[in-house]
Amino acid sequence: MNRFAPWLRTAVLTAAALAAPFATQAQGSSGSNGPDYPTKPIKLIVPYPPGGGTDVIARIVQERFQAQLGQPVVIDNRGGAAGSIGTELAAKSAADGYTVLFTLSSHTINPAIYAKLPFDTQRDFEPVAMVASLPQILVANASFPANNVAELVAMAKAKPGSLSYATVGNGSPGHLAGELFKLRTGTELTHVPYRGGGPAVTDVMGGQVPLLWVSIPAAAQFVKAGKLKALAVSTTKRSAAFPDVPTMQEAGIADFEVDSWYAMFVPTKTPKAAIEKLNRVVNTVVREPEIRDKLLAQGSEGVGGTPEQLGKVVSTELVRWNKLAKEANIRVD
């Protein structure tokens, strides 16, 4: 037996060496590199609480994502710090295609207004695709005296500092819109940041805060029910969901535009095959008539596009919002 041991040892080692490439290939085909991706549930981190605009849009597309991917897509709401808590969690997750960040355009605003973030917007993430785009909307408590922007400006100037406006948090598009409004109108309003759109909407309807800048999905049903009063939208064209609500520029506020978007990102070094698969699914889902109609009902439009196009938006806005933050002296320590 002993005289055959070297031969047996050599044969075993040779067989193992020959089998290794095939084992690796098989593993890759069922992981995030191969054509079978995904092979297990995908976590969709939404860095805002349930009920807010980001959560609403994520849940509109969630079911169709699951159908297209053939695996459960689980939404994990991690609100707080204007999206930074959930975003940090996503940045530090395994880059295997099974953790996806579903966030909004505060992703490019936060670096301009926070002195320090626990992640780097560009270095720590790879873009997947833009899902939807929509305006911010300025709404008021139903009993608020002002019925339009001109009346609001007059009220704010008559009693400087007496009015406050809520947003989903520091660094949100609503925060940017609110501070831009102050800058363009020469008024003083106090910012009241919340941990998400749901809590902010509730307090404005309850009268704790008179005004709210928020994405349309978070406020749409309450505006339509008469529980909130819509004053203006932040984009240069009116929203399809609220065609009777003027833009800020139509309301007499020149050089005013804040566009909101929702998009998907993955941790840096996520396999390209996984990114490409997720991108294809986004582009398929946002063009489905049912999803398109649901997005339009929320005042948003499906976008899609390539990862490179989303990356260009990120790069451009990082520069734009940094400039505005300095001009309006927006800073959060």
Image (spheres, rainbow, N blue to C red):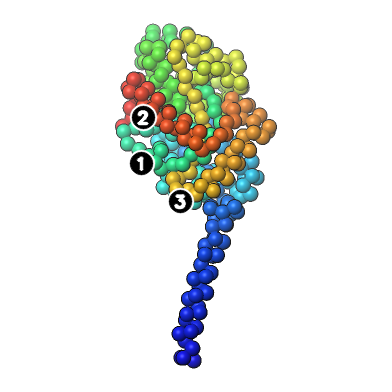
Q: Which residue is mark 1?
A: 118
Residue 143 point in image, percent of width and height: 52, 15
Residue positioned 52% across, 62% down in the render = 24
Does residue 244 appear in this view? yes
Residue 114 point in image, percent of width and height: 34, 32
Spatial CA distance of label 3 from label 1 is: 16 Å
Residue positioned 59% across, 52% down in the render = 35
Element carrying mark 2:
helix
**Dot 3, crowdedness within 10 Å: few (<14), some or many (≥20)?**
some
Taking depth in this image into account, of 98 and 72 the one nearest to the observer is 98
**Dot 2, crowdedness within 10 Å: few (<14), some or many (≥20)?**
many
Residue positioned 42% across, 17% down in the render = 181
Element carrying mark 3:
loop
Residue positioned 53% across, 34% down in the render = 130
Q: Which residue is mark 3?
A: 94
Residue 328 point in image, percent of width and height: 35, 20
Amino acid type, label 3: Ala
Q: Which residue is mark 2?
A: 112
Looking at the rendered structure, the number of numbered marks drawn on it comes to 3
